[in-house]
Image (spheres, grey):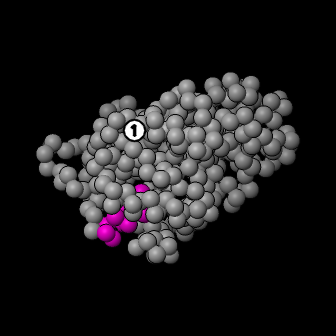
Amino acid sequence: MTRIRFARNAVALAAAGVLTLTACGGSDPLASDGGDSDSATIVIGSQAYYSNEIVAEIYAQALEADDIEVDRQFQIGQREVYLPEIESGAIDLFPEYTGPLLLALDAKATATKPDEVYAALGDALPKGLRLLDASPATDQDSYVVTKEFADKWGVATIEDLKKVTDPLVFGANSEAESRPNGPKGLKATYGVDVKFAPIEDSGGPLTVKALQDGDIQIGLIYTADPSIKKNDLVTLTDSKGLFLASAFVPVASDDVDDDAAAIINKISAAMSPEDLIALNARSVEEKLPAATIAKDWLKAENLS
């Protein structure tokens, strides 16, 4: 089985008990001495994923423009690492994705449509947390294959993978192996068997290269990732709802007051699916930092 490592292996760090949280000041929100933090400051977190960090930075700059203090705790890791910190109140605001978060909180959830998923997620959130408005922008988990593979086997949907007679290897972050839309879910929903190859870059360039090199045949890549179009990859249609609807949604603690929430809700309303892909492209192709991308978008939307 191919095993590909990436520098940010959040799961391995968590297992080792070493959680490094990078922020603009390099501070660690878990390293508080218990009494020095300013309760008026909003702590904003992000995943170890560039797209999520860009949205978190947009939140931060918009709040700062209204003279609200923020503490950036970005690039924390994947959901298994940061969710306990949201639940504990260490993080006040986090850009999340409706479907995956719902499954993380309720593995037996049956909602699939956007409004149903949003409502179910609101009910599943722990006490002290609430959803702000969901955005039209989506960043859906998806199974992706190369065009060469799709053409060879006549594959357009996930169900079509049953036609493939060669062994299949599925590549994604290591936590995907046990998630509902991982190998077990693929087998249960579509009757397709795959081997699993951990690739710790959240569907990034290592995943794309593994697909192109034939080390894996299926990759988990988010739908708003510009690399899908750039590399002529094929997103397989999920006809049986293995992936829940996944809109960007801010998760907020009770410390996020109505004024701050109103600012974040304006951001959610303004961001379109096309905006998110364009923001991601500026990071991937232009190699711009999240702060620059966020500043430019806020200015273009008259939100700064």
Q: Is residue 63 magenta?
A: yes
Judged left or right of residue 143, residue 22 is: left
For the residue pair 45 and 66, the one nearer the viewer reads as: 66
User: Can the viewer see residue 160 in this picture?
Assistant: yes
Q: Is residue 270 magenta?
A: no
At 36% from the left and 42% from the top, the residue drawn is: 129
Residue that badge 1 annotates? 83
- Residue 184 lies, in percent from the top left, at 63, 25
In the rendered view, would you say 123 is above or below 76? above
In the rendered view, would you say 260 is above or below 93? below
Q: Which residues are magenta?
A: 56-66
Which secondary structure dominates the residues rendered in magenta? helix
SS under mark 1: helix
- Splitting the image into 4 quarters, where does residue 156 fall? top right
- Residue 235 lies, in percent from the top left, at 72, 47
For the residue pair 124 and 289, the one nearer the viewer reads as: 124
Judged left or right of residue 240, residue 286 is: left
- Splitting the image into 4 quarters, where does residue 85 fall? top left
- Residue 38 lies, in percent from the top left, at 18, 54
At 26% from the left and 47% from the top, the residue drawn is: 29
Question: Which of the image's four quarters has the N terminus?
Answer: top right
At label 1, the amino acid type is Leu
In the rendered view, would you say 151 is above or below 161? below
- Splitting the image into 4 quarters, where does residue 99 fall? top right
At 15% from the left and 43% from the top, the residue drawn is: 33
Judged left or right of residue 51, residue 74 is: left
- Residue 39 lies, in percent from the top left, at 20, 52
How many discs mark residues in the rendered view?
1
At 85% from the left and 46% from the top, the residue drawn is: 151
